[in-house]
C-alpha cells in the first residue's frame, strides 16, 4: 500500500482527505512538521505528500526515497522547491480554482471597508465618538479606478464585481493577452501606469523570485495620496518596510491586508497601530465550501498520480513528457 503523509495542517479534521484516499486504497499518515528535519523524518518513505506550510526544500526532496507526488493545499507553491522536485521526477500539484469567489469577495469587502472607512468609524463609535467627521474624507466609488496587479481567475472575478459599482478597472499582467482583457472590459497597463492612475490597488500576483517586493518605494512614490492598497495574495509581494514608510508619511491613504510579510504578524509590527490599516489573518480563501473543496481536490491530486494518472492540477508541466502516467478523460 502506498503511504501518503500530511506534512502539516491547521484543519480540525482530515475526513475529506481520508475519504478520497481510502476510496483509492491509500493510507494516510498525519504529521505536524515545522522544520526540514521533521519533514524528512516523517516523509522519507512516503509515496505522496500533502503540504500546507512545512518547508519542502531541495534538502527535503533529496531525502524522499519513494515520493512521486507533492500536493499543496492552495494556489501558491512557494513552500516547495519546484526545480528540485522536477529534477527528481516528482509531480507538484496545487488547486487553482477552489476559492475564486471567496478571495474576490474578500478583496472587494476590504476595498469597500477602506473606501467607506467602515472599520475606523466602527472603532470610533465603540469608543463613544458619534461623529461622521471621523471618516472624512470619503469619495464616491462610481468613477473611481481599481488597479489589479495580476489578472488571473480571481482578479477577473473581482473586476466584474467592481464594475457593477461603476468602478473603472485597469490591470497589470504581462502574461495576459489583450483579448482576454478586452473581453473583461479591462485595460492592460504597465505597473507604473497602474500605480499612478488607480485609486484602489488590489494585489493578486503569485509569490516568486520575480514578484517578491515588486511593490516598493518606487511604486508608492507615484501613487495618489488617496490610494488604498489591498493585498489578498502573498505578503512579500509588497515590500512591507516601504509600505509602512508610505503610510507613516501619508504617501497613500491606507491599506487593507489579508496577508503580511511574516505570518502570524509580530506584536511590534507598526501596522498594528495604524488607524488607516485593516488587518485580517489570511482568511480570504476561506468558506466552509471552499475548504472542503480544497481538501478533496488536494487529496485527489495525490490519488491520481499514485493511481497512474496525471492530476488535473499540475505545476511542473514539463514532467508530462517524461513520466509514464496516463491522461484522464476529464482533464
Image (cartoon, rainbow, N blue to C red):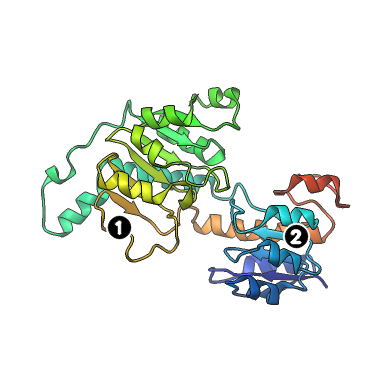
230 to the left or right of 39? left
In this rendering, is residue 140 above or below 285?
above
Inter-mark Cα distance, 1 to 2: 40 Å
The residue positioned farthest toward the right in the image shown: 324
Q: Is residue 281 left or right of residue 245?
A: right
Farthest front residue in view: 218
Give the quadrant of the C terminus.
top right
Q: Residue at x 54, y 33 (%)?
A: 173
The quarter of the picture where the N terminus appears is bottom right
Point out residue 117 in the picture as x, y percentages from the top left corner.
25, 45
In the rendered image, which residue does mark 2 sit on? Answer: 69
Q: Which residue: 47% across, 31% down?
A: 191
Above or below 188: residue 308: below
Q: Position of residue 137 (x, y in %)?
A: 19, 37
Per the rendering, the mark at residue 312 is: none
Q: Earlier in the sequence, mark 1 or mark 2?
A: 2
Instruction: Tell me the element at label 2.
Output: strand
Which residue is found at the position 33% from the left and 46% from the top? 255
Q: Residues within 10 Å of mark 2 (few under 14, many from 20)?
A: many
- Taking the image as shown, residue 51 lies to the left or right of residue 321, namely left
Percent position (x, y) of residue 296?
Answer: 65, 59
Q: Closer to the camera, 115 or 297?
A: 115
| Image-quadrant location for residue 16 | bottom right
Q: Give the percent coordinates (x, y) of residue 262.
A: 45, 60
Which residue bears the numbered disc 1?
270
Foreground mark, 1 or 2?
A: 1
Q: Residues within 10 Å of mark 1 (few under 14, many from 20)?
A: few
Q: Quadrant of residue 180?
A: top right
Residue at disc 1, secondary structure: helix
Is residue 78 at all visible to an observer of this figure? Answer: yes
Q: Nearer the viewer, residue 70 or 192?
A: 192
Amino acid at each position: 500500500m502506498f503511504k501518503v503523509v500530511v506534512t502539516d495542517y491547521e484543519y480540525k479534521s482530515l475526513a475529506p482527505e481520508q475519504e478520497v484516499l481510502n476510496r483509492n486504497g491509500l493510507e494516510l499518515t498525519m504529521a505536524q512538521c515545522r522544520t526540514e528535519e521533521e519533514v524528512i523524518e516523517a516523509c522519507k518513505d512516503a509515496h505522496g505528500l500533502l503540504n500546507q506550510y512545512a518547508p519542502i526544500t531541495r534538502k527535503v526532496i533529496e531525502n524522499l526515497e519513494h515520493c512521486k507526488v507533492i500536493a499543496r493545499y492552495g494556489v501558491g507553491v512557494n513552500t516547495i522547491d519546484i526545480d528540485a522536485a522536477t529534477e527528481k521526477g516528482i509531480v507538484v500539484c496545487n488547486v487553482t480554482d477552489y476559492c475564486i469567489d471567496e478571495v474576490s469577495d474578500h478583496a472587494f469587502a476590504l476595498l469597500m471597508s477602506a473606501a467607506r472607512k467602515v472599520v475606523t468609524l466602527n472603532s470610533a463609535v465603540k469608543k463613544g465618538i458619534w461623529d461622521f467627521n471621523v471618516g472624512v474624507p470619503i469619495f464616491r466609488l462610481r468613477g473611481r479606478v481599481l488597479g489589479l496587479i495580476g489578472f488571473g481567475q480571481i482578479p477577473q472575478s473581482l473586476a466584474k464585481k467592481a464594475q457593477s459599482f461603476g468602478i473603472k478597472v485597469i490591470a497589470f499582467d504581462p502574461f495576459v493577452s489583450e483579448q482576454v482583457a478586452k473581453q473583461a472590459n479591462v485595460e492592460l497597463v504597465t505597473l507604473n501606469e497602474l500605480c499612478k492612475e488607480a485609486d484602489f490597488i488590489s494585489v493578486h500576483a503569485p509569490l516568486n523570485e520575480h514578484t517578491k517586493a515588486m511593490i516598493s518605494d518606487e511604486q508608492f512614490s507615484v501613487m495618489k495620496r488617496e490610494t488604498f492598497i489591498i493585498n489578498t495574495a502573498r505578503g512579500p509581494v509588497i515590500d512591507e518596510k516601504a509600505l509602512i514608510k508610505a503610510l507613516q508619511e501619508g504617501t497613500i491613504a491606507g491599506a487593507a491586508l489579508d496577508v503580511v510579510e511574516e505570518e502570524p504578524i509580530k506584536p511590534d509590527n507598526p501596522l498594528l497601530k495604524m488607524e488607516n490599516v485593516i488587518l485580517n489573518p489570511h482568511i480570504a480563501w476561506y468558506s466552509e465550501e471552499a475548504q472542503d473543496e480544497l481538501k478533496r481536490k488536494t487529496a485527489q491530486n495525490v490519488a491520481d498520480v499514485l493511481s497512474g494518472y496525471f492530476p488535473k492540477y499540475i505545476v511542473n508541466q514539463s514532467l508530462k513528457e517524461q513520466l509514464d502516467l496516463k491522461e484522464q478523460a476529464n482533464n
